[in-house]
Image: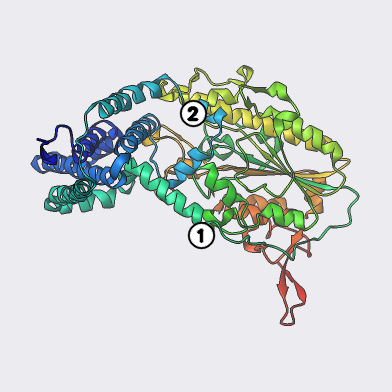
């Protein structure tokens, strides 16, 4: 006689999900528990809260696993989630990062060369024991065979049971949870695999929302070209992962910018980035919209300042030594820096001296006003040592590995400072090339980093923290300008006025409109109040923002 389904041997689907949830809570959430115990108040209530939190996380993870594993997808989905939880736990533990949709977007846009810096034996070992062992058991344990009706009933019972467990564990200590969640908003980004699942869902939602008609901006743009015997060349360098805290131009104790100091550049000392990751900051940096109005989901469907400048008749080119322009150069001429000097490259990555050769190839071809954007590799971590040739390793000892958790903080900071000093060398070289052409062209160099970096402060490393909780080290960035004598006279820059402006707050919001002002582009998209140079020009004819008369005829309004 065939036994009833309830008596058949094997583990139920609810049992597998509950076991997997318990394993994940205990092994994949070290960063969460570290934060929790730092904030825990000792005493009887503290231990009760700890037990309550363990059951609450178990209930929530059980609920997540149960919702994602209906029917025959149980084993495959659980296997994937075990691997995801192990990988997420390793990255959070190693680099002190939190995982949200912005971090996942950054991961999705990482190329193979960058990914290689993170993959190694430590990650493989974590995946082997934390995911490999339970996945092997998952596929060896017999699963109870049931009818589809019983499967549906188990699915419903598991969902209800997980909710009941969560509520029973958390409600008696509601005040403790309210205080913890209010004071530690980042904790939700540290719970694996929920942080990856929720972050992925939010990223997909933002991406789908971004599929909309293209929005042209600055259709009225025109170039207010002054009568000049020489072309004006604007070189904008987009830095990578350079934080203001380590620029000696801004007061850092180490002399990381000796060459730029001698150049007499204009350094803005209080600049805030638009995001904490390249995938957010670069599109926002080149948007005509300030951060408060910027929507990343719509950025791919809206003109950038590069499009506006090009539409006005100014030549634009993007030269990349990074993992791409994140969509902002999609409609302008683009090429990679390595084509001009492959000797600067190894293992798919190039030192930033490739940008020196790229600019050297461009300047002889310049016969009219141009905007050239150079996207630098800068201080991209965790392999800071790979951004610097050995003869530029000024600060010793360095951290010669991607496993920065194995290095002392002194080694990490030394390697990072070497990358900043090498940026100083590259920018000085670019300025030197422009200065050598002073008889044939007027030139401006503008440098700004996309975001900052954490170097171990408060246990955090790298970047990409959710913006609201990100530390200042990830949001404060360097911004500087250099003008050739001809450009300073041509643009009527008042040096004394500009020096008075340097210590005032600025942000990525200012960059696009400063570029429009430098390029002498007249358009209704130009916001004079966001142009860093708008109030520091001698000329009576500043860049103008076009307005419309009631009849629809364009009219000039001085910006």
Q: In this view, does 78 lie to the left or right of 343?
A: left
Tell me the residue at 10%/44% (across/down): 45
The residue nearer to you, when weighing 522 against 210, is 210
Q: Do we see residue 141 in this rendering? A: yes
For this orientation, the residue located farthest to the bottom is 551
Does residue 219 sit above or below 332 in this rendering?
below
In primary-sequence order, the first of circles 2 and 1 is 1
- Residue 394 x, y percent position in the rendering: 58, 21
Pointer 1 local density, CA inside 10 Å: few below 14, some 14–19, many at least 20: few
Image quarter of the C terminus: bottom right
Farthest residue toward the front?
A: 1
What residue appears at the point 64 percent right and 48 percent down from the top-left corner?
Answer: 328
Residue 158 falls left or right of residue 260? left
**Rendered image coloring scheme:** rainbow
Question: Looking at the picture, how far across and down is residue 213, in whole percent?
Answer: 60, 61
Quarter residue 543 falls in:
bottom right
Q: Is residue 279 above or below residue 422?
A: below
Q: Quadrant of the N terminus?
A: top left
Q: Position of residue 167 (x, y in %)?
A: 16, 52
Q: Nearer the viewer, residue 487 or 92?
A: 92
Q: Where is residue 312 in the image (x, y as percent from the top left)?
A: 78, 58
* Picture disc at residue 382: 2
Q: Mark 1 points at which residue?
A: 292
Using the rendered image of the protein, determine whether residue 191 is visible from the camera's viewpoint.
no
Q: Is mark 2 on a helix, strand or loop?
A: loop
| Tag 1 secondary structure | loop
């Amino acid at each position: 006689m065939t036994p009833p389904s309830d008596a058949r041997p094997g583990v139920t689907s609810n049992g597998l999900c509950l076991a997997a949830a318990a394993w994940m809570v205990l092994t994949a959430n070290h960063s969460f528990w570290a934060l929790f115990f730092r904030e825990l108040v000792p005493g009887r209530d503290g231990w009760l809260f700890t037990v309550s939190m363990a059951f609450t996380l178990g209930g929530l993870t059980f609920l997540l696993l149960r919702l994602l594993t209906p029917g025959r997808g149980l084993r495959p989905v659980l296997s994937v989630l075990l691997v995801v939880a192990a990988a997420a736990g390793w990255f959070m533990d190693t680099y002190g990062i939190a995982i949200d949709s912005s971090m996942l977007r950054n991961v999705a846009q990482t190329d193979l060369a960058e990914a290689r810096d993170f993959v190694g034996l430590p990650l493989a070992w974590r995946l082997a024991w934390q995911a490999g062992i339970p996945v092997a058991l998952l596929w060896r344990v017999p699963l109870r065979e049931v009818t589809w009706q019983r499967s549906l009933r188990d699915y419903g019972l598991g969902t209800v049971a997980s909710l009941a467990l969560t509520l029973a564990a958390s409600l008696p200590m509601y005040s403790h949870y309210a205080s913890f969640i209010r004071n530690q908003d980042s904790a939700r980004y540290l719970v694996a695999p929920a942080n990856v699942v929720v972050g992925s869902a939010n990223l997909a939602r933002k991406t789908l929302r971004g599929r909309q008609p293209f929005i042209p901006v600055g259709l009225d743009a025109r170039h207010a070209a002054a009568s000049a015997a020489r072309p004006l060349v604007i070189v904008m360098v987009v830095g990578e992962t350079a934080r203001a805290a380590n620029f000696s131009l801004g007061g850092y104790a180490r002399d990381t910018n000796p060459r730029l100091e001698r150049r007499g550049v204009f350094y803005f000392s209080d600049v805030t980035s638009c995001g904490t990751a390249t995938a957010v900051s670069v599109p926002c940096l080149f948007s005509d919209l300030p951060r408060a109005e910027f929507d990343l989901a719509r950025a791919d469907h809206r003109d950038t300042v590069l499009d506006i400048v090009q539409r006005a008749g100014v030549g634009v080119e993007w030269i990349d030594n990074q993992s791409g322009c994140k969509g902002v150069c999609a409609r302008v001429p683009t090429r990679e820096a390595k084509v001009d000097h492959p000797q600067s490259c190894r293992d798919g990555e190039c030192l930033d001296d490739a940008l020196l050769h790229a600019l050297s190839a461009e300047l002889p071809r310049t016969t009219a006003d141009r905007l050239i954007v150079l996207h630098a590799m800068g201080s991209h971590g965790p392999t800071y040592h790979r951004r610097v040739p050995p003869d530029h390793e000024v600060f010793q000892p360095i951290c010669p590995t991607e496993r920065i958790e194995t290095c002392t903080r002194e080694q990490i900071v030394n390697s990072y400072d070497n990358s900043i000093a090498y940026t100083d060398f590259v920018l000085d070289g670019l300025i030197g090339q422009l200065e050598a052409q002073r008889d044939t062209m007027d030139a401006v160099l503008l440098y700004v980093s996309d975001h900052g970096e954490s170097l171990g402060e408060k246990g955090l490393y790298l970047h990409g923290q959710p913006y609201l909780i990100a530390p200042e080290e990830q949001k404060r960035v360097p911004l500087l300008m250099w003008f050739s004598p001809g450009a300073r006279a041509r643009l009527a820059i008042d040096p004394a006025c500009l020096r008075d402006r340097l210590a005032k707050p600025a942000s990525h919001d200012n960059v696009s409109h400063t570029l429009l002002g430098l390029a002498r582009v007249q358009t209704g998209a130009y916001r004079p109040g966001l142009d860093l140079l708008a109030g520091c020009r001698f000329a009576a004819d500043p860049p103008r923002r076009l307005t419309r008369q009631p009849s629809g005829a364009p009219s000039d309004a001085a910006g």
